[in-house]
Amino acid sequence: MRLGYPCINRSIGCTANSTFRLKNYSEDNLIEKVSNNLNCLQRILEFNIKDNLLFFRISSDLVPFASHPVCRYDWAKHFKKKFKEIGNYINKHKIRVSMHPDQFVLINAKDKDIVRRSIKELDYHCSVLDVLGLDTSAKVQIHVGGVYGEKDESIQRFIDNYKKLSKKIRKRLVIENDYRSYSLKDCILINKKINIPIIFDNYHHECLNNGESVREAIIKAKKTWKKKDGRLIVDYSSQGAKRGVHSISINIPLFKKFLKETKGLDFDIMLEIKDKEKSALKAIKCLK
DNA sequence: AGTTGTCAAGCTAGT
DNA sequence: ACTAGCTTGACAACT
């Protein structure tokens, strides 16, 4: 079992998601930002290793505008050496890595242009993991997408469009249950058709479920992961003071309860909590 | 130096 | 018809 946090570390004063405005796009700007982001990514991973945080989500902004038509630059080639260096570090320390494209990536959209742009964005995410030299356990996670008032058709569109994706994308793409449209049960229905692995999000499951306990749900999600996919990934968070709002810092008693409920099941935990590495450091103590 | 409006991209529910 | 929320920063213009 590994534990980690997404994208940002607030302790070391170095971010791997620095960007710029589209109107300021230039090759020089791109190279400067990517160079900074890669250096910071390395530093964050080094910070994480010290405390045995072996799971990290890389920001989609690692290479700003990578899938935008404005970007014609071969960043993968330019930074090949640096990517390889970081990838070797990740592999050497057996760090798990994932990425999570933003909410506008919708492969089941009705608008073909949205689908086309989404595929470009997915291709970019997979390129990052490829050029790092990571195996197929490094995943790219998205939600199923919109409902558009016709859920069955929208699910079918997801399945049809998934089948048309390149192997490069399919080997890394996974879906996650969301909090209002597609429950774990819906994701499993899709999995039965196309074998796509399912990330289990405990907080979304609290908001939208079909009566499964957390333990049952994790057992079901776990079955969708094959050996080549690595361990099941669980996105963990809990509700904050206000309903529907994520907690600012981890609630340790709740986390311990979760661990107790899932005892004996092996999975990697991504902590989706606002204060990032601070909560991760608290949580990792509970694992020991 | 500090503050604040704005930033490529979309869906959904609520007003 | 329009906006807040998802989840969230941080760029960049302005004071």
Image (cartoon, coloured by chain):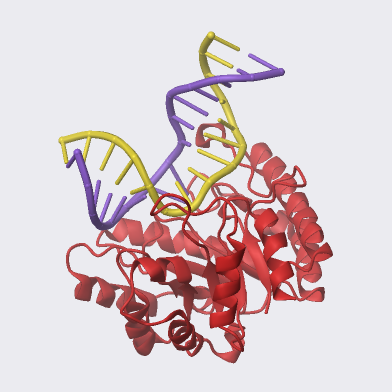
Chain colours: A red, B purple, C yellow
Work out which quarter of the rendered image holds the C terminus of chain A and state it.
bottom right
Q: Position of residue A248 (x, y in %)?
A: 56, 50
The residue under the point 36% across, 66% down is: A207
Which x, y percent locates residue A116?
37, 61
Quarter of the image for residue A178 reads bottom left
**In this picture, residue A199 sits left or right of residue A228:** left
Q: Is residue B15 left or right of residue A193?
A: left
Residue at point 26% right, 58% down?
Answer: A111
- Whether residue A96 is visible, yes or no, is no
Q: Residue at x 80, y 54 (%)?
A: A43
**Position of A14 relative to A184 (above/below):** above
Query: Where is residue A246 drawn, in percent x and y?
Result: 48, 54
Q: Percent position (x, y) of residue A124?
A: 55, 61
Name above or below for residue A161 compared with residue A25. Answer: below
Q: Is residue A95 visible?
A: yes
Residue A240 vs residue A200, the one in the foreground? A240
Relative vertical location of residue A153 with respect to residue A80 in this rendering, above or below: below
For the N terminus of chain A, the image quarter is: bottom right
In front of the other: B15 or A149: B15
